[in-house]
Amino acid sequence: MAQMQRAAQNARNNESRPPGQGTRTIPLRILVPLIVACALFMENLDATVLSTALPAIAHDLDQSPIQLKLALTSYLLTLAVFIPASGWVADRFGTRVVFRMAILIFAFGSALCGFANSIEWLVAARAFQGVGGAMMVPVGRLVILRTIPRSELVGALAWLTVPALLGPVLGPPVGGFITTYFHWRWIFWINLPIACLGLVLATLFIPNVRGESISQFDYLGFVLSSIGLAGLVSASAALDASGIPVWIALVLFLVGAVSVSLYVLHARRARSPILDLKLLRIPTFRAGIVGGSLFRIGVGAMPLLLPLQLQLGFGMTPLNSGLLIFAAALGAIGMKTAAGRILKRFGFRTVLTFNAITSGAMIAAPACFTRATPISVMFAILFVGGFFRSLQFTCINAISVAEIDQSEMSQATSFTSAFQQIALSLGITVGASMLQLSLAIDHRETLRVSDFVLAFLVVGFFAVLSFVSFARLPKDAGEEVAGRKRLASAAVAVANGRS
């Protein structure tokens, strides 16, 4: 607790105080998450708008919609490579400096995507975007974790997530509207004014928090982890891509597996590894990594599968499919006001375990959609699914740092962020692979409604499987973060008074 108080004080001292802090009237626990949410809003808007426009972009670039998943995986791949370094870079140069630079890189990459005239250009520009994204959101979350007490963490994460959820809410209808009535290139250029706003707010109000003690950068660990993660994610993406020989995918997988194995050996002996594997000894952190990754595999496939099903399978326009997907984001926003109360009532283990099964079932539910399914039924299922997925994400993000010391917070943030992006990338690959498998079985090249049944069932199964990891949590896991510790103390005080 003393380290947390010192970190909060550092956020207010002369070095860390941003230029506009003297006139600030909004509390730090609300203001900082809202500003970081601008970056998360931009990133989520970009992803959801792109997923809605995938069929149109594929047609314009003369590519298969499934092949265009490379534009999604290349971005996630770059995130996985550079996120491990984000914590150290923020400790070394300060959160405000790194946060602003990340926004600039992301915005420049968005502009390049808008000018793409080939799939190679688009994939390269998305990869460049990922360099900015790798620093932008993890560093923003690090500021929150270092300046806000654990007892207020769930509330702060809610403030962070509610505005950021406007990205998925606005993304599908905005993407559909732009693609239908204008041109898909504008879906990338709308990031530029949002980036300008984020730069101004970050300059005025984000504290320039640095690490109390900065270790030497783990260059060998960075190289090994980068090659390993890049190799594994690239292999999974290449395995189901037509035109790429299977032996190339196998070589990529072998290189990635060997590099990851070498990194594990290196991390056991290094004084300050870039990804500290010792953190996995903490039960709550391990559950957040393992269970959270399985859950995100299921969620990660949705931006690919759902727009393709609605547009190619049911013949909807990009605008109509975007408005329907809008339901999931509305449900997610509705959950944010209830998350804190639910956690206080039931605790992390119960909520995470049962909600993993519920959310996984809702992810698989579109497998039952047919052309005869009423729009109102689809809307209701997507709304409820978004509601429970939002609760699961809030709980996973909170439990992952519930027992992490402030001295290890930058390491934990980099670790969790890297595995989040790997899982999302694997989700896209799993979903696309199931579609390719359905086409191969029937010897077809055109997607039909029936092709999506297997894909949704498989990714839903991954999400449900995450309950195993959460069920193994201690019963009192994360009580302080959930607010149950204070309730228990109050109950004991009342009981003592009665006695």
Image: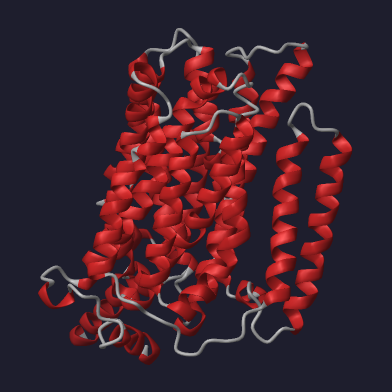
> Is 398 located above or below residue 411 in the figure?
above
Residue drawn at point x = 56 percent, y = 55 percent:
79
Q: Is residue 124 visible?
A: yes
The tally of labels here is 0
Residue 11: % across, % down: 30, 81
Residue 381: % across, % down: 40, 28
Instruction: Report the residue that reaches farthest toward the top.
Output: 372
Res. 218 image quadrant:
bottom right
Near-viewer residue (311 or 289): 311
> Is 168 located above or below residue 30 in the figure?
above
Q: Is residue 341 visible?
A: no
Res. 305 image quadrant:
top right
461 vs 389, left or right, is right
Res. 272 image quadrant:
bottom right
Residue drawn at point x = 86 percent, y = 35 percent:
246
Residue 393: % across, % down: 44, 52
Instruction: Report the residue that reaches farthest toward the right.
Output: 247
83 vs 174, left or right, is right
Residue drawn at point x = 36 percent, y = 47 percent:
42
In the picture, the quarter occupied by the C terminus is bottom left
Residue 412: % across, % down: 53, 72
299 vs 444, left or right, is left
